């Protein structure tokens, strides 16, 4: 008998879990599910890839099946809010698998798709609706959906919703919800503004935490290359060439930059594609499907993909450009070493990215092992991990990187707005 059997879940739900290959609860599931089944509000802190979707999906489905009611026209019984289209689609897919064989109807509404088709699907009511905040507000404005009967609310990846500026949208949505409801909030980090969000949405929540904020998965091997910006593409190609048959995610800051990089990789013979904010939802969905199927081995992305991609066989994550927000680094490298597998996270650091590197290492409480080069501008590097001494900066304490022509010239830092535009 599994721990799920001992939770007194509906038999159909246990059967669905077994069919999905989920036989034993993860730490976040074993801690959160019992409290949620008892109707308590839950605030869960855990990194992506730890099983958070089932941690809220199982108690939601179990309680809805026990209530055995049906949603009215345009009505929603349970709402799950997610920051990105990719994450919302992934959650909905997981919930559909979980509720297969039951009467529960799962729906998803995100931007980039026909709102008229979504309005049509919502007319008969939805048991569990997964939504991005912007599209949900569009539907509320058109009176195409009613949250009045919604007694279950989940905020997933709440810290990213704050990063993306959704706080006003969340307040608007909260005003449409009944005060008597069960709320669960899940986040990988706990920024200061999260306390305001928690106080607004949660009532005497149980707090469960299984991974300290800022900590990467234990099975991710990290390495760092100090490399001039002009040399990054060639180093990336050199490293990718060593594992052409294995899936790799490459992250950068800007939509145009990542599209250009993807075109270069294609010309060099890699099966590559890209996802970013300039792509339509259909293009993004097709790219992710091809990556999952192994038809594409290199997926180039902005931080639109840093969370919500659950692809167990991603072996390598490359930070072609370091993110402006330190927590985004943790989420990026969390795309590998999933489902108990090993993974490798490679970071490139140009002279103008030393501030980002220091912030990342401070947040994680570690020094990323150096694979090549030396710290720029006199910053003392971590202990070298071997490998070619490519693109190196100065020796510790010498103040400036070694001169090697104009490409060593320091460039100004990008602003935070550029990272937000990349989504």
Image (cartoon, helix red, strand yellow):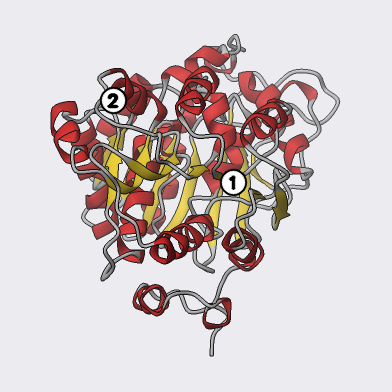
Give left or right: position of 203 versus 162.
right
Of tags 1 and 2, which is closer to the observer? 2
**Residue 175 in view:** yes
**Residue 296 in view:** no
Residue 396 drawn above or below residue 398? below
Q: Residue at position x 77%, y 45% from top? A: 366
Q: Residues within 10 Å of mark 1 (few under 14, many from 20)?
A: few
Q: Residue at position x 30%, y 59% from top? A: 104
Query: Observer-nearest residue: 194 or 105?
Result: 105
Cα separation between marks 1 and 2: 55 Å
Q: Position of residue 245 (x, y in %)?
A: 31, 60
- Residue that badge 1 annotates: 388
- Residue that badge 2 annotates: 139
Q: Mark 1 or mark 2, which has the lower sequence index?
A: 2
Residue 390 occupies quadrant? top right
Query: Observer-nearest residue: 20 or 298?
Result: 20
Query: Observer-nearest residue: 195 or 149?
Result: 149
Q: Position of residue 303 (x, y in %)?
A: 45, 32
């Amino acid at each position: 008998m599994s721990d799920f059997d001992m939770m007194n879940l509906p038999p159909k739900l246990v059967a669905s879990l077994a069919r999905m290959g989920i036989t034993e609860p993860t730490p976040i599931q074993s801690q959160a599910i019992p409290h949620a089944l008892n109707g308590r509000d839950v605030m869960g802190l855990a990194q992506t890839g730890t099983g958070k979707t089932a941690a809220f999906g199982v108690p939601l489905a179990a309680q809805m099946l026990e209530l055995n009611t049906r949603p009215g026209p345009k009505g929603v019984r349970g709402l799950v809010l997610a920051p990105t289209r990719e994450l919302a689609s992934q959650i909905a897919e997981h919930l559909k698998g979980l509720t297969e064989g039951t009467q529960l109807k799962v729906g998803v509404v995100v931007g980039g798709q026909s709102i008229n088709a979504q309005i049509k699907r919502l007319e008969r009511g939805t048991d569990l609706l997964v939504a991005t905040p912007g599209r949900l507000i569009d539907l509320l404005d058109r009176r195409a959906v009613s949250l009045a009967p919604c007694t279950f609310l989940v905020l997933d990846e709440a810290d990213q919703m704050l990063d993306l500026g959704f706080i006003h949208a969340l307040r608007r949505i909260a005003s449409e919800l009944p005060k008597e409801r069960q709320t669960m909030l899940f986040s990988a980090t706990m920024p200061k503004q999260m306390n305001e969000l928690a106080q607004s949405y949660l009532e005497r929540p149980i707090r469960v935490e299984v991974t300290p904020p800022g900590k990467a998965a234990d099975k991710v091997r990290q390495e760092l290359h100090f490399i001039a910006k002009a040399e990054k593409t060639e180093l990336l190609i050199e490293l990718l060439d060593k594992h052409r048959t294995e899936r790799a995610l490459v992250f950068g800051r800007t939509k145009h930059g990542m599209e250009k990089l993807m075109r270069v990789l294609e010309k060099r013979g890699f099966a590559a594609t890209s996802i970013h904010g300039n792509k339509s939802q259909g293009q993004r969905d097709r790219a992710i499907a091809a990556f999952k199927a192994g038809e594409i081995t290199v997926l180039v992305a902005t931080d639109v993909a840093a969370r919500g991609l659950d692809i167990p066989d991603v072996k390598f994550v490359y930070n072609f450009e370091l993110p402006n927000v330190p927590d985004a680094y943790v989420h990026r490298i969390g795309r590998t070493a999933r489902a108990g597998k090993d993974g490798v996270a490679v970071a490139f650091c140009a002279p103008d990215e030393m501030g980002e590197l220091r912030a990342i290492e401070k947040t994680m409480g570690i020094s990323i092992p150096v694979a090549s080069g030396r710290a720029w501008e006199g910053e003392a590097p971590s202990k070298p991990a071997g490998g070619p001494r490519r693109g190196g900066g100065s020796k510790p304490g010498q103040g400036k990187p070694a001169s090697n022509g104009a490409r060593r010239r320091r460039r100004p830092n990008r602003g935070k707005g550029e990272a937000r535009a990349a989504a």
